[in-house]
């Protein structure tokens, strides 16, 4: 089976994190110069950028995943049922309901589109699933809902991130699982405080959150592998059924 390429969204994300790390190094320089106000300003910017880059990454890789599915030109029955239902939900809007209830004849075209989503003999080259990230205060729950629409249940549990730490009981390092969901929620909470309340965290909180950057890089790679596995599975099942 041909190996699928890495997602462009992961490369873009890593480059964005490089920029955040440049800000962190700049903040360290201001600290050495005893310019604490400028250090705080740079760290606040780095934290805000980190949160924004994460949300943009979630949205971008979801869009890229759907695009790759579209490029496969599969039959309707070869696509995951959850993905089809997500597409129906995305198209069945409040505006469409109002058109139907008011007897607006323009609703017919929308209904036909939904019918084609459920049942169509032509290869599927357009999948209308909501891949937009719901920006705001909500944290990990919105991330999980986004990927659930792509037929991925609890993305944080599906992409396990580990790290090695020194063991007190052995000469070998201990493998520890990183709770990325908890860390993302902590980041979101502090960022919301900065944006909505102008509340700046203490130095320890800054250091704790910004030191998680390597874990977010690993999580992104894990998510890319998970999505590639899903694409391979879908393509394999389609080949068997053909």
Image: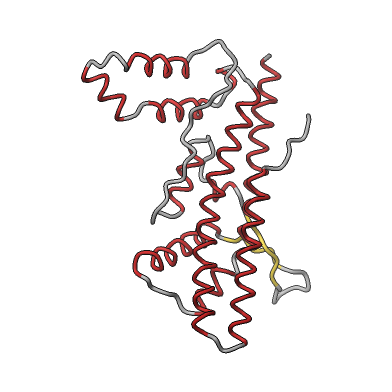
**Residue 91, image quadrant:** top left
Q: Is residue 233 above or below residue 202?
A: above
- x 45%, y 30%: residue: 86
Quarter placement of the N terminus: top right
Q: Is residue 194 left or right of residue 238?
A: left
Count of marks placed on residues:
0
On the picture, is 241 further left or further right than 149?
Answer: right
Q: Position of residue 154 (x, y in %)?
A: 51, 45
The single residue placed furthest to the left in the displayed view is 102
Direction bottom: furthest residue? 34
Q: Nearer the viewer, residue 26 or 58?
A: 26
141 to 190, vertically: above or below: above
Residue 158: image location, x then y, percent = 58, 46
Q: Residue at x 37, y 71 (%)?
A: 198
- Residue plotted at (57% across, 89% down): 34
Report x, y in % for residue 99. Answer: 27, 21
Residue 80 coordinates in the image, percent (x, y): 55, 27
Relative vertical location of residue 157 with respect to residue 79 in this rendering, above or below: below
The residue located at (64%, 69%) in the rendering is: 22
Camera-nearest residue between 7 and 86 = 7
Looking at the image, residue 100 sits to the left or right of residue 120; the answer is: left
Query: Which part of the image, by quadrant, shows the C terminus?
Result: top right
């Amino acid at each position: 089976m041909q190996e699928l390429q890495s997602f462009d969204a992961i490369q873009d994300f890593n480059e964005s994190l490089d920029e955040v790390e440049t800000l962190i190094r700049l903040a360290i320089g201001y600290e050495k110069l005893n310019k604490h106000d400028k250090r705080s300003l740079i760290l606040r910017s780095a934290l805000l950028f980190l949160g924004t880059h994460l949300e943009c990454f979630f949205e971008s890789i979801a869009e890229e995943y759907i695009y790759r599915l579209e490029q496969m030109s599969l039959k309707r029955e070869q696509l995951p049922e959850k993905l089809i239902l997500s597409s129906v939900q995305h198209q069945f809007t409040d505006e469409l309901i109002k058109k139907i209830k008011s007897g607006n004849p323009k609703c017919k075209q929308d209904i036909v589109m939904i019918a084609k989503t459920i049942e169509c003999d032509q290869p599927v080259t357009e999948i209308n699933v909501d891949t937009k990230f719901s920006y705001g205060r909500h944290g990990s729950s919105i991330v999980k809902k986004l990927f659930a629409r792509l037929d991925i249940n609890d993305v944080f549990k599906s992409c396990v991130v580990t790290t090695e730490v020194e063991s007190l009981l052995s000469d070998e390092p201990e493998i520890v699982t990183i709770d990325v969901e908890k860390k993302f929620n902590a980041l979101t909470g502090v960022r919301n405080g900065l944006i909505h309340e102008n509340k700046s965290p203490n130095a320890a909180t800054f250091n704790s959150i910004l030191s998680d950057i390597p874990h977010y890089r690993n999580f992104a790679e894990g998510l890319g592998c998970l999505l590639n596995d899903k694409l391979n599975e879908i393509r394999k099942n389609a080949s068997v059924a053909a």
